[in-house]
Amino acid sequence: MAFSFDPALSTLKDQIRLRLADTASASAVFDDLSIEAMLAMYSYDEACAQLAESAGAEFSRMASTVDNGPVKYQYQERAAFFTGLAKSIRSLAQPAPGAPEFTGATFGDMRHPDLRCYKTD
């Protein structure tokens, strides 16, 4: 698995790794290609959210607790963390610099609204 992280945050990939707390090569959750693929398909914030959901799904498939002597892993807590992180990222998402702000509202000519789905009888 190819892993790289530049603490100078010179690329969006590095910024995503920092935001997802995936900066240590020994415990990396994502490889470079996965992050770059998400960035190719989605905006920065949505790529972060998609990756967080992916990690949450991966950890939710693992045993809830693995106890190996002095080391104990709680994978369900990791799943909940990444799922909550995805939700948080989406709630704080901002438009890219220079992009129009998305308000969630659609637009069109309101003088002649489309009323085809309403019954008038």
Image: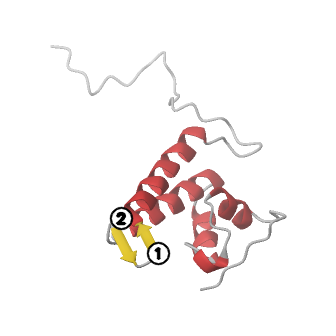
Characterize the local packing of mark 2: few (<14), some (14-19) or many (20 or more) Cα atoms within 10 angstroms: some
Of badges 2 and 1, the one in the foreground is: 1
Q: Amino acid at mark 1?
A: Val
Q: Quadrant of residue 118?
A: top left
Q: Nearer the viewer, residue 70 or 36?
A: 70
Q: Residue at x 48, y 45 (%)?
A: 87
Q: Amino acid at mark 2?
A: Ser
Residue 94's spot in the image, x, y percent? 66, 41
What residue is pinned by disc 2? Answer: 60
Q: Residue at x 40, y 66 (%)?
A: 75
Q: Residue furthest toward the bottom?
A: 1
Residue 71's spot in the image, x, y percent? 46, 75
Q: Residue furthest toward the front?
A: 70
Residue 104's spot in the image, x, y percent? 51, 32
65 w.r.t. 86: above or below? below
Secondary structure found at label 1: strand
Q: Nearer the viewer, residue 34 or 24?
A: 24
What residue is pinned by disc 1? Answer: 71
Left or right of 105, for residue 31: right
Cβ–Cβ under 8 Å for marks 2 and 1:
no
Q: Which quadrant is the C terminus positioned in?
A: top left
